[in-house]
């Protein structure tokens, strides 16, 4: 309903309905209860050769084929509560601050043969004992960001990912760089668990500004030209509301947070979101068997400004549902967000990643990604361009455009 | 491919027509930029530098206790633009990538940068 242009002034906003909780330190939810490092054996045959069966989403023993489902992480650790009820700062223990001096390379004693086995947590959470061939896993959380609160298993098979990448690149071959075309091998795609923070937010929002509603549109003749003009009413506009955000997902690797197109193609990995983090299961290193992983290297405090700004963006979009009357737009002059509650959970999310290293003629290099969401199949990519061919064709198009443009101008 | 071309065409049309009626003369001017538009559309189609996660609309969110205040301030006449100056109710500030601004980050010739609407220019 359009606002009245006259009449008694509407009531001003009252005080906030709910007092904003002052954070006194995060409430930590332990998410590695019962987790053990070392040999993780099949409960039926005792083998340590266990991996994800993508078809079912369960862990399967590669020796006796016994399958076991992992419980839903958010439900298990009671991290799935209604965001409306959130107060203060709640974090999973796997989201705890990284202690810089914590070792990345850890040594485990193989419980089967006694040999010492090294796991480099920077790139892997498992290692095979070089003596008895058992697999050792790291499941306990230490403050180096390696073990998250939860993991979202791959749902999309490698064959489907290869088909998606082939189709995506196949539609972009005309101006693709010839070296890329010669070297493109989609079967080299790699499954990677990327680190993310999944955040729930309970916030109070206040927006104040001005909006414009068009009242008239008309044309005036100036010589041979007709110009269009508009009349509009200006309103002082304010909105105050509570917002509950569920599963806002942000990258927690500093390398992936840098999404500058001139330097990297990390925006491609960003573009395949969203995931369905609510389906994540409790962390178990066996889910990583056969896949690569990247370690989290940022803390909640590093990511908080991004989450706050993105929460404001979401709030602004939600407010638009009440602003249809202002068909010329609204300019917010003041925006306030009071965070009543936040819940941070670290997660490994699945990405099929094809990367191509392009060595440019000027000596610089650039890594192009074609990424497939390991859950939904959403595909995005960066394909190296044959600049010479594209410039030549663009020049031809430009010449034709100029000729047509001149003809039209002369006729007009 | 089509959305990219449509977006670019929209930019050129907005820049060239300045929200006035399209006429043959302006169509001619737009055609003179066809090569630049083609290059930009192909660049975005292959490199996808404008793509990003649309969290602002795709993230699950719910609002409650909405309080609204709308009071008439004044009337404006004879405005040239169809959009309010400085309107930002659909702007996104938390994205670390994407948007059409990536099109102009050292990709297109500087000459074209000058004719783009303000929000798409290099800063």
Image: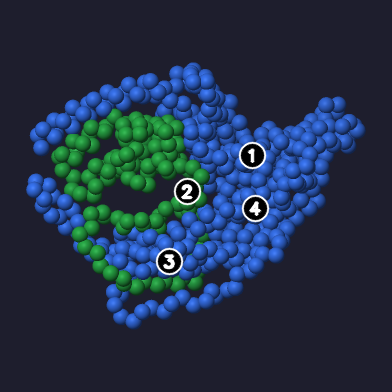
Chain colours: A blue, B green
Residue A315, compared with residue B2, is above or below; it is: below
Task: Kindly report which numbered mark, 2 or 1, lies closer to the viewer in this rendering.
Answer: 2
Residue A13, compared with residue A307, is above or below; it is: below
Residue pointed to by mark 4: A301
Residue pointed to by mark 2: B54
Q: CA distance from mark 3 to mark 2?
A: 24 Å
Task: Examine the image and state in which quarter residue A16 appears.
Answer: bottom right
Q: Residue at x 87, y 32 (%)?
A: A116
Image disc number at residue A208:
3
User: Mark 3 falls on what kind of element?
Assistant: strand
Residue pointed to by mark 1: A193
Where is residue A146 shown, x and y percent of the image? 72, 42
Q: Residue at x 52, y 76 (%)?
A: A15
Q: Residues within 10 Å of mark 3 (few under 14, many from 20)?
A: some
Q: Mark 2 and 1 residues: CB-CB less than 8 Å, in contact?
A: no
Q: Residue at x 60, y 54 (%)?
A: A304
Earlier-in-chain disc, 1 versus 3: 1
Decide if residue A164 is in sight here.
no
Of residue A211 and residue A115, the one placed in the foreground of this image is A211
Decide if residue A129 is in sight here.
yes
Q: Chain of mark 3?
A: A
Q: Chain of mark 1?
A: A
Residue B92, compared with residue A67, is above or below; it is: below
Q: CA distance from mark 1 to mark 3?
A: 42 Å
């Amino acid at each position: 309903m359009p606002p009245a242009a006259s009449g008694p002034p509407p009531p001003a906003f009252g005080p906030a309905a709910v007092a904003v909780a002052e954070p006194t330190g995060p409430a930590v939810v332990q998410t590695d209860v019962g987790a053990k490092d070392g040999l993780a054996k099949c409960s039926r045959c005792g083998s340590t050769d266990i991996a994800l069966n993508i078809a079912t989403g369960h862990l399967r023993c590669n020796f006796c084929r016994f399958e076991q489902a992992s419980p839903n992480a958010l439900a298990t650790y009671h991290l799935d509560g209604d965001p409306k009820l959130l107060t203060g700062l709640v974090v999973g223990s796997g989201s705890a601050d990284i202690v810089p001096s914590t070792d990345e390379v850890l040594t485990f004693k193989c419980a089967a043969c006694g040999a010492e086995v090294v796991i480099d947590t920077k790139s892997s959470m498992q290692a095979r004992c070089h003596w008895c061939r058992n697999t050792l896993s790291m499941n306990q959380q230490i403050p180096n960001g390696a073990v998250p609160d939860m993991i979202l298993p791959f749902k999309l098979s490698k064959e489907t990912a290869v088909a998606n990448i082939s189709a995506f690149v196949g539609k972009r071959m005309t101006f693709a760089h010839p070296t890329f075309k010669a070297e493109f091998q989609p079967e080299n795609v790699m499954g990677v668990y990327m680190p993310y923070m999944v955040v729930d937010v309970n916030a109070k929002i206040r927006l104040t500004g001005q909006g414009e509603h068009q009242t008239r549109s008309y044309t005036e003749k100036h010589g041979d030209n007709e110009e269009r003009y508009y009349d509009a009413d200006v309103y002082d506009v304010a909105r105050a509301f509570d917002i509950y955000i569920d599963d806002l997902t942000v990258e927690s690797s500093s390398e992936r947070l840098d999404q500058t197109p001139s330097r990297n193609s990390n925006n491609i990995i960003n573009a395949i979101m969203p995931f369905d983090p609510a389906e994540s299961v409790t962390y178990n290193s066996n889910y990583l068997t056969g896949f690569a992983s990247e370690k989290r290297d940022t803390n909640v405090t590093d990511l908080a400004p991004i989450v706050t700004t993105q929460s404001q963006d979401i709030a602004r979009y939600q407010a638009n549902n009440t602003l249809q009357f202002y068909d010329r737009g609204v300019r917010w002059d003041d925006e306030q967000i009071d965070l009543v509650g936040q819940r941070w959970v670290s997660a490994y999310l699945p990405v099929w990643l094809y990367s191509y290293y392009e060595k440019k003629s000027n000596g610089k290099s650039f890594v192009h990604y074609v990424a497939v969401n390991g859950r939904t199949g959403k595909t995005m990519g960066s394909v190296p361009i044959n600049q010479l061919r594209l410039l030549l064709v663009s020049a031809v198009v430009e010449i034709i455009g100029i000729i047509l443009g001149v003809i039209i101008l002369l006729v007009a | 491919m089509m959305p990219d071309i449509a977006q670019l065409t929209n930019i050129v049309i907005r820049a060239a027509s300045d929200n006035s009626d399209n006429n043959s003369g302006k169509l001619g001017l737009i055609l003179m930029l066809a090569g630049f538009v083609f290059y930009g559309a192909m660049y975005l189609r292959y490199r996808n530098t404008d793509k990003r996660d649309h969290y602002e609309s795709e993230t699950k969110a719910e609002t409650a206790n909405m309080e609204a205040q709308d009071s008439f301030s004044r009337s404006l006449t004879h405005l040239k633009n169809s959009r309010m100056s400085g309107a930002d109710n659909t702007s996104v500030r938390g994205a670390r990538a994407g948007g059409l601004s990536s099109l102009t980050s050292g990709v297109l010739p500087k000459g074209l940068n000058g004719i783009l609407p303000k929000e798409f220019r290099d800063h």
